[in-house]
Amino acid sequence: MSETHHFDAIVIGSGPGGEGAAMGLTKAGLNVAIVEKEQSVGGGCTHWGTIPSKALRHAVSRIIEFNSNPLFCHNNTSLHATFPNILLHAKSVIDKQTRLRQGFYDRNKCTLLFGVAQFIDSHTIEVLQHDGSKERYTADKFVIATGSRPYQPHDVDFSHPRIYDSDSILNLAHDPRHILIYGAGVIGCEYASIFRGLGVKTDLINTRDRLLSFLDNEVSDALSYHFWNNGVVIRNDETYQSIEGCRDGVIVHLKSGKKMKADCLLYANGRTGNTDRLNLEVLGLAADSRGQLGVNRSYQTEVEHIYAVGDVIGYPSLASAAYDQGRFVAQIIAFGASNSQLIEDIPTGIYTIPEISSVGKTEQELTNAKIPYEVGRSSFKHLARAQIAGTDVGSLKILFHRETKEILGIHCFGERAAEIIHIGQAIMEQKGAANTIEYFVNTTFNYPTMAEAYRVAALNGLNRLF
């Protein structure tokens, strides 16, 4: 084997985790290769997950905004788009993101290898290229960043033309009148917003007793109400007995005895790590039942020179966190230690319509921990900027300690929630006296802005103290 086939480090997977690792390693002066099984970089995040779903959501929310604005919607005219129509917008964003990320590798002289990688031994991988040829490469260190894919139970026929998962739904070519979504996690709720926003009759089958139960209860209830108010039918505490694909649609037989039929089904209940094609057995490694690898605090697997980051190691399974994990691993490999680690309170961003974002503790967690807290609230309908923009559905809630006034949690429901949350997060991350709700009262906000919600909520909360 020629010397050109050896690298200081090989990263498997070019999603956020792999990109973070590869960029960090190349900038540290190491000779790095990254392997991508698809024909362009970006991983599942760019091609099937975060980017397309958020691009679809944005297009739908703008259509809703236009159709509900009396300035534009008059004489009974309204915009209408089909799912295939708005997919064109998502594809244009994917193309831009792919070109951007390809440029990162080119400028940093990181070798790109396109094909499917598997381990031959602990220091060698074989890459099956798209033309059927195979090449072998060796490295001192490896980073597994292969991500995850939608979970597909064996008793569901995903080859049926009306049964989709959250990847294949991007190939939906017809315009459904009625869709069933099985699984009401983040992905299921986001797609319920998208399809209902397009006027598609939407039934959401939730295997749990409430939507997104990890959220603050009030926020979860608000999402349930807005789904109900917009015509989404939610079936809580239901599981399927069987899923039957037929010529003109899909029938879901529920264990409760109910039957539901629609034009198509989106199965969005769980994900599994992409480890099954890596030939981990030769390393003495084994993934768990969800295809995930165990790692230590330095993201090392049980094999010392092999690391793993991103969805393939489980929680928090966020693109933002995966990129940071990749950066940390690059520092550990290049310098022996990382100068930072994941923050404790990672914000959630859920791109439903309306949007949801939160950071820190929920009311339920604080109550169970017997922490004396108070609540400050701000309703978007009272904010001038929201009134101007016509985005007055939603609210901001700040939870703070009654005695120290330390900010304990922030929960936002409404348009741009995932942006608004970072203002509060920045203050939460400060140490000592700098992290108190009084900051929002003592600072001056631009007027009119959505950020003003923090001042209103802070005053509301402080007024509750006695």
Image (tube, grey):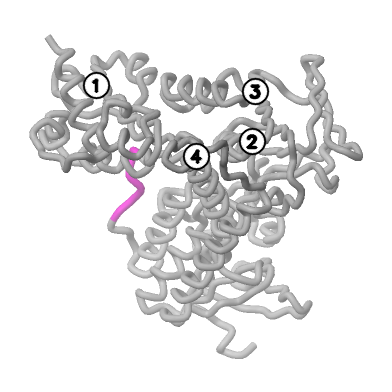
What is the spatial separation of the Cα atoms under label 1 and label 2, in whole angstroms?
36 Å
Q: At label 1, which amino acid type do we have?
A: Gly
| Residue highlighted by disc 4 | 73
Whether residue 351 is visible: no
Q: Residue furthest bottom?
A: 2
Q: Quadrant of the N terminus?
A: bottom right
Nearer the N terminus, badge 2 or badge 3? 2
Q: In x, y percent, where is residue 96?
A: 51, 67
- Asked where in the image residue 336 lies, by quadrant, the reply is bottom left
Query: Which of label 4 and label 1 is nearer to you?
Result: 4
- Vertical comparison of 128 with 429: above or below: below
Q: Is residue 298 left or right of residue 165?
A: left
Query: Which residue ends up furthest to the left in the rendered image?
Result: 442
Whether residue 1 is visible to the viewer of this picture, yes or no, is yes
Lateral position of residue 430 relative to residue 191, left or right: left
Q: Crowdedness of circle 1 by 10 Å Cα count: few (<14), some, many (20+)?
A: many
Q: Looking at the picture, which amino acid does disc 4 mark?
A: Cys
Q: Quadrant of residue 355?
A: top left
Give the residue pinned by disc 2: 199
- Mark 4 vs mark 1: which is more N-terminal? 4
**Residue 61 x/y as whole percent:** 50, 42
Which residue is at a point 81% across and 40% down the rendered structure image?
154
Foreground pick, 143 / 74? 74
The alpha-carbon separation of the residues under discs 4 and 1 comes to 36 Å
Q: Secondary structure at mark 3?
A: strand
- Look at the image and give the residue range highlighted in magenta: 340-345
- Label 3 and label 4: CA atoms lie apart by 27 Å
Q: Earlier in the sequence, mark 4 or mark 2?
A: 4
Residue type at mark 3 is Val
**Which residue is denoted by mark 3 in the rendering?**
233
Q: CA distance from mark 4 to mark 2?
A: 16 Å
